[in-house]
Image (cartoon, rainbow, N blue to C red):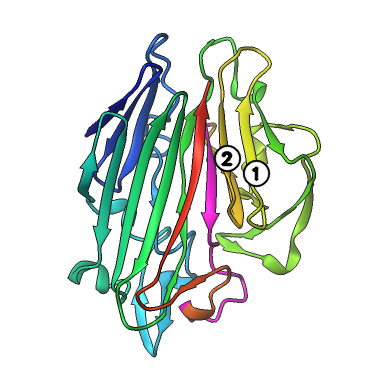
Amino acid sequence: MFTLKNQYLTVKINPLGAELTSVTDNDSHLEYMWQADQAFWGRHAPFLFPIVGRLQDNQYQVDGQTYQMTQHGFARDRTFTVVNQSATALTLQLQADAQSREKYPFAFKLTVHYTLVDHGLQVAATIQNQGTQTMPWSFGAHPGFNLPLGQASADFTDYQVTVAPKQVYQRVPLVGPYSDTQHAVPLDLTQPLALKHTLFDHDAQILTLNNRETTVMLSTPKDDHGVALTVAAPYLGIWSPYPKQAPFVCLEPWWGLADDVQATGDLRTKVAIHQLAPGADTQVGYQITYF
């Protein structure tokens, strides 16, 4: 486990999955991150690569070959190596090997960089194609936040999600675990979205952001503690398990989606997939502010 610390926050990161496991306030010792209670969800903040969500039949085809891959890909279950570390920054890396090629036949390098700045954590991921063919990829983050934060008098239903810019967003519905992009529905976020467990009775609420910089804040009028995630991504998921009444919610920036209900199985034409040319790299990222 790696530790980053400044005068405000202490952050812990597990090399397994390069997963953020803890963010605590140095003065109050308040824990912001979900602590992976297996009764509800046994992860903290996994990275999703090289797919987001589920594939139909947990498989796909590329260049005439069929490959098996389970939900959210394999990076979250692989150990990353350390590139460098300081008191407030950490860089971890995962590179293609024989094990990954069984599921994803591309010569990738995934580098994750954490930087602790004041009350915020900046997260950047660089995806490199080190091969000789175009590489289809998706990426996502899945951080879970404790509810309540701080005062025990607050409850899950006392919290709200405030989105800026305030507008009506297009929401991608899910049919089972699959995206139904042809039937997007409006979600009015000109006012805060009140949290309730039944909000997730059809899984995540998926907002279409169209790569516009967006801030999603999780807070309650009952106290001053909360988190705000800022990102410019195609999509953002808001999720908590249902019908379990779990004491956490996830704010998830996504550069990808689960297979569409009309999916053909071809990874290169998968809904919301990205393509990376041979020898090229791309960077995605977001920032979480803790208050």
Q: Position of residue 65 (x, y in %)?
A: 35, 86
- Residue at (48% x, 49% y) in the render: 285
The foreground one among 90 and 199 is 90
Front one among 289 and 17: 289
Q: What amino acid type should be assigned to the residue bearing mark 2? A: Thr
Is 55 a magenta residue?
no
What is the magenta range? 246-267
Residue 162 is left or right of residue 64, and the answer is: right
Residue underneath mark 1: 214
Vertical side of 244 occupied by 168: above or below: below
- Where is residue 138 drawn, in percent x and y? 47, 64
Instruction: Look at mark 2 in the image and give the residue it sits on.
Output: 230
Q: Nearer the viewer, residue 272 or 117?
A: 117
Residue 263 percent across, percent down from the top left: 57, 76
Relative to 7, residue 185 above or below? below
Q: Quadrant of residue 230?
A: top right
Residue visible at 65% across and 24% down in the picture: 157
Q: Are marks 2 and 1 in contact (CB under 8 Å)?
A: yes
Kindly identify the amino acid type of the residue bearing the numbered disc 1.
Thr
